[in-house]
Image (cartoon, rainbow, N blue to C red):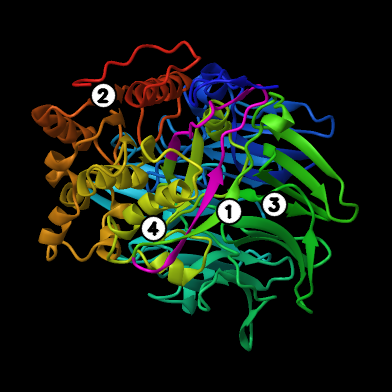
Amino acid sequence: MKDRASYGSWPSPIGIELVTSGQMRSFGGVWFVGDRVAWLESRPDEGGRTALVAAGPDGEPADLVPAGFNVRTRVHEYGGGACWFHGETAFCSSFDDSRVYRIERAAVPRAITPEPPVEHALRYADGVVTPDGSTIVCVRERHESGEVVNELVTVPADRSGDVRVLVSGSDFYSNPRLAPDGRTLAWLQWDNPNMPWDGTELWVGELSGEGVADARLVAGGPDESIFQPEWSPDGVLHFSSDRTGWWNLYALRDDGARAIAPVEGEVGLPQWSFAERSYAFLGDGRIARKVGERAVDRLELVDAESGAVAPVLGPWTEYGSTSFDAHGAEIAFAAGGPREPYAVVVLDTRTGDRRVVRRAFEFELVSDALSEPRAIEFPTRDGATAHAFYYPPVSATHEGREGELPPLRVICHGGPTAHSGPALLLSYQFWTSRGIGVVDVNYRGSTGFGRPYRDALRGRWGEIDVTDCIDAAAHLAEKGEIDPERIWIEGGSAGGFVVLCALSMYPGVIGAGVSHFGVADMKAFAETTHKFEARYLDTLIGPYPDGADLYEERSPIHHVDRIDRPLLLLQGLDDRVVPPSQSEIMIEGLERKGVPYAYLAFEGEGHGFRRSDSQRRALEAVLAFVGQVFGFTPADEVQPLEVAHL
C-alpha cells in the first residue's frame, strides 16, 4: 500500500543533484568514423563544454579532443555544425576562439583558420571536405564594423593558403554539400525577412579556380522551405521540401524533382542550428529516414526506386536533430522514447540488432514509477484544435491525499517554431515523481503537424500560443485531472515570452509563472537581437518599425502592471539573444506594484544554462518557488529562495 502525502511533497529517487550532475549528458552530431562511432556530448559538470567522443568495437568511449576543448560555434548564435570529418580526421570549431582546428589521432589540435583581428570576428560552421582531403567548404560569419556578413568559403585543410570567399550576397547560407566527384556543390541560401523554415533556395554550381561556375537555382523559393540537401553515393541530389504542406523527401533528376514515398509527416525540421539531418543513405541504395507525425518520430527504410516503405521497430519516439548517419547496413543516431532514456545507438538494418553506445544517464528507474506521456488534443477558445503531451504524477511509494488534486506545470517550448516530443526526460520525471503533473504544449505554430499548423502563428505571436497553453491547462482541469488553483506556466526564450504574456495579458487565470530568459520587449528584441533572428518578428507579429504600435501591444513589459500572480525570472548575464535588461525591466514593474517575485541572474551563462551549478540552482529555485506559492513543502533540502512581497 502506498503512503498518502500532499501532492508536491512526495519524496523522489530523482534528486536535484542527479538531474543536474555530470551523470546527465546530451548528444548532438553522430558519425561513423572508420570502425568507430563518434558523437558530440554536452557536459554540465565541465562548465557546459561540448566534447567530441568516440567508441570503437570494444564499446569504451574516449574523448577525441583534449580536456577543456569546447566543440561549439557561434555562427547564428545558436551554432550547430561545429564538427565534420574527412576519414578519421576531425575538423572542429573551438568555442574559445572561434577558429577551426584539425584533430587527428594522438596529435595536438592544429588551428587551420587565421586568428581574427577582433575576438570571435570570424566564425565557421557546417563544413564539408573535398574527396582528396585538401579543401574545406563551409559557412563563415564575419563580424566587422558593426556589420555581420554570412558567406560560403573554402579553407585549405592543412592551412597551406588563404581562406577564399566562394559564394556571397545573400543574407544566410547553410548546407554546402559536395557531390561524390567533388566538382559539384549544392547549398541553401535565404534572405531576410525569411527564416529557413519559411523559404529557402537550393542552388547548385560547379567548383572552379575562380569560385562557383554555372550557379543555378534548382528548388525552393520565398514560400518553400528546403531542408538537408544531400548527394546519394551515385551522385543524385536529394532534399526535403514542404511544398505539399509537409517536409517530404525528393530526388532531383534530369526530368525534375521526384517525391520519394510521400507521407503526411515531416521528413525535416526547423533549421535552428546547422547540420540537422532527417535521412541518410544505406549501402544497398535504401534510404533511412525519420518521420515526425503529430510530434512523434518514427524510423523507416525506403526503397528509393519503388517507394516501398519498411518500418523499423524500436522504442524511440524522439530523435536528435543533428544525430543521424549511415554506413553500409548500419544506422547511428541519438534518440529516446517514453521508457527509454536518450542514447547513442547503432542499429543493424539487416538483423534488427541494436547496440547502445552511450546513455544520457545510467541511473535505473523503477518502471512503475515512470510517468508516460499521453498525447492529448484539446479545443481552443477560437474553435481550433491544439496538441500537447500530458505526464501525470506517478510514484512507486506515494499517492495523493484523498480529495486532493495535483498541481500542474504547463511547459511552453521555445522557438516558437519548434516542438516537444514524447521522451524519457528526468527533468519531467523530477516533477511527476513528486506528485506534480506536467503538460508539454505544442501550441499552434509548432512544427511536427504540417505547414498550415506551423503558419497558424503568423501575425499572432503572443496571442494564440498563449491562449493554447492556458486552454491546455483548462482542458485538464475540466477533466478533473489537476487542481485549477495550483497551475504554473514555465518556459524559456519564446516560451518565457508566453509565460510573461499569460500573466500580464490574462491576469488571475494562471497561479504563477517561471520565465527562463523570456522575451519581454518586442521592440527592443527587434532592434537589438542578433542577425539570424533580426527579422523573425516580421512574420510572427508584423513588419517593424511600421507596426511599432502592435509591437508595444504584444510586449509584456508594457503590461507588467496587470500582473497579479507570483513570478520567478531566471536569466543568463551573457545572453546575446535576450539580454538581461529585459528581465530587469520586468522586475522594476513587479517591485513597483508589490507583486511577489524572485530574480536569479547567472554569471557566465548565455541563452540556455549549460553549467551544472547553474542548472542545479535554477531547478531548486523553481521547486522552492512553487512550494512557497502553492503551499506544499518539498521533501528535498533546497537552498532558500527569497520571494519578495510574498
Assign a secondary structure to mark 4. Answer: strand
* Residue visible at 14% across and 45% down in the picture: 559
- Chain-order first, disc 2 or disc 1: 1
| Residue 582 falls left or right of residue 632 | left
Q: Quadrant of the N terminus?
A: top right
Q: Quadrant of residue 510?
A: top left
| 215 in relation to 349, above or below | below
- 386 drawn magenta: yes
What distance separates the C-alpha of mark 4 from that of mark 2?
Answer: 43 Å
* Residue visible at 15% across and 35% down in the picture: 585
Instruction: Report crowding for label 4: few under 14, some 14 to 19, many 20 or more residues within 10 A (C-alpha).
Output: many
Q: Which residue is mark 3?
A: 325
Q: The magenta stretch spans which residues?
A: 382-409
Q: Nearer the viewer, mark 2 or mark 1?
A: 1
Q: Which residue is mark 4?
A: 151
Q: Which residue is mark 1?
A: 375
Amino acid marked by disc 2: Ala
What distance separates the C-alpha of mark 4 from that of mark 3?
Answer: 26 Å
What distance separates the C-alpha of mark 2 from that of mark 1?
Answer: 33 Å
Assign a secondary structure to mark 2. Answer: strand
Residue 209 in sight here: no
Can you give x and y, in whole percent of width and height, for residue 556 in the image? 19, 46
Disc 4, disc 2: CB below 8 Å? no
Instruction: Report crowding for label 2: few under 14, some 14 to 19, many 20 or more residues within 10 A (C-alpha).
Output: many
Amino acid marked by disc 4: Glu
| 509 in relation to 187, above or below | above
Q: Which residue is mark 2?
A: 598
Q: Nearer the viewer, mark 4 or mark 2?
A: 2
Q: Quadrant of the C terminus?
A: top left
Amino acid marked by disc 3: Asp
| 433 in relation to 251, above or below | above
